[in-house]
Image: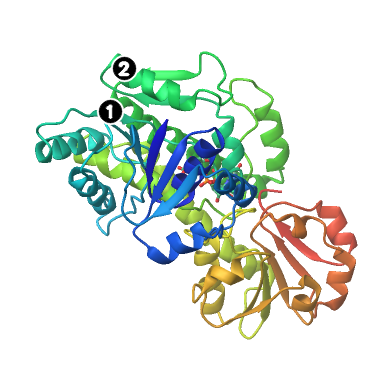
Amino acid sequence: MSVIVFGCGYVGLVTAVCLARMGHIVQCVDIESNKVAALSKGTIPFYEPGLKQRLVLAQKDQKISFVTRPSLDAEICIIAVGTPLASDGSSDLTQIYAVADTISEMENPPKTVIVKSTVPPGTTRNLSRYIQEKCPNRKFDFISNPEFLRQGNAVEDFQRPDRVVVGADSAPAFETVERLYDGFSLPSGKFVKTDIETAELTKYAANSFLTTKIAFMNELAGYCEKIGANIDDVAEGMGLDARIGPEFLRVGPGIGGSCFPKDIQTLSSVAQERENPLGIVDAVIRANRLHLEAMSAKVMDLCGGNLNGLKIVVFGVTFKANTDDLRNSPAHAIIPALQKAGAKVTIVDPVARKNAGRAFEAVVWEDDPYLAASNAEAIVILTEWDMFRTLDLEKLAKVSKEPRLADLRNLYDRETARKAGFKYTSVGR
Ligand code: UGA
């Protein structure tokens, strides 16, 4: 099939590359000409394992191209542009409507429009009215097909999804999506066909539910600390119940990324607008904020309540491992809080430095963890990168001025850290 993908961010680019590798002819459209030029040469603007190799192969087979304006007579277009949070907490749909304008101006627009961007329920239908009004002589099929891939695991998630959720109004529309994904290993019976609004909401519901699981564990971790219980063992004991499952019960410094914080906020806002407040979602937003504050306080406690002039080394600033994405990373809340209390911060992160720009003010960047820890008065692990899982703790304690370790991803066994010489704290243990 021939497909135009609007938006070359994580979702758009992964979708485009995977569809091209499946044999479809794909044209990717992005308004940023620098990005288009770089992608045309096989350079990916972000870190995503396995994506570059697949892009290069798709380019070699001439299955994929990059442009700033669409020029392909395609059967399908996929909208995968960003829907950031607006300042009032609603979803900023500017990019979505800019794509709608582009589609309406095409000489031969695609008949099927698939919305993959995460959009508030009702958006796809509004978009369909908007385009249909501009092109009264054409007939479009509008489809909501939210994406559930995770950054850092995006290719695998796209190629082997747990499920595909499709919201549409007609049987031919469902068939078009089935043909598009034919060839991917979809578990049988996991193709959820529904109406457009339900598909849109399913995305917010899934992200909000996963966020609730993590926030619940993070909150419970504080209570574990009070009574001397171990949150990791609680998670294991809970997760073995098939009705709960082991995933997304891992405690950490707080929930981040470009999706979870934005999506729970949007779901809360749109439900509020319809006078149906979602108390649990609101509580999760509050719990995550409090948890982030508690993490800075934890580092403060480890250092005896005074950070003034202390050298603190932060291991990992991306919102999770295997991505260079800093959006809503817990580091954005925790590092300024430490600095405000007088700490001098050094950062080690295997990939973040290149794209960090001025994301963190007045910090020193180091590549080598041991060099960074030299004369440190505390080390704080924020991201679970592999390089921080296998540290030589004795060496690290020796080079530190004051061996203190706040392991906010629970990567180390407490006894091992203490034996290595660290005054040690973690989350919920
Ligand atoms: C998330 C969802 O997992 C995807 O299914 C969804 O498609 C995507 O958002 C999206 O809406 O585009 P992602 O943002 O890549 O994917 O990151 P996750 O792996 O879900 O992690 C999100 C945050 O939760 C991170 O800060 C991570 O460290 C934290 N987390 C995750 C925990 O603290 N504990 C866990 O057990 C799992």
The kind of residue tagged 2 is: Pro
The kind of residue tagged 1 is: Glu
Q: Secondary structure at mark 2?
A: helix
93 with respect to 178 (left or right): left
Residue, x 65% and y 31% (percent of image)? 246
Quadrant observed for ligand 1 in the rendered image = top right
What is the x, y in percent for residue 26? Answer: 44, 41
Neighbourhood count class around disc 2 (C-alpha, 10 Å): few under 14, some 14–19, many 20 upward: few
Rendered position, 377 above or below 7: below
What is the x, y in percent for residue 154? Answer: 57, 43
| Quadrant of the rendered image containing residue 198 | top left
Which label sits in the foreground, 1 or 2?
2
Asked if the beta carbon under badge 2 is closer than 8 A to the nearest atom of ligand 1, the reply is: no
Tag shown at residue 289: none
| Quadrant of the rendered image containing residue 250 | top right
| Quadrant of the rendered image containing residue 342 | bottom right
245 and 84: which one is in front?
84
Residue, x 83% and y 59% (percent of image)? 417
Neighbourhood count class around disc 1 (C-alpha, 10 Å): few under 14, some 14–19, many 20 upward: some
Report the residue marked by disc 1. 197
Point out the image quarter for the N terminus. Answer: top left
137 and 181: which one is in front?
137
What is the x, y in percent for residue 336? Answer: 51, 73
Earlier-in-chain disc, 1 versus 2: 2
Report the residue marked by disc 2. 172
Q: CA distance from mark 1 to mark 2?
A: 18 Å
Q: Secondary structure at mark 1?
A: helix
Let me know if residue 279 appears in the view. Answer: yes
389 with respect to 169 (left or right): right
Rendered position, 384 above or below 211: below
**Total marks in image:** 2
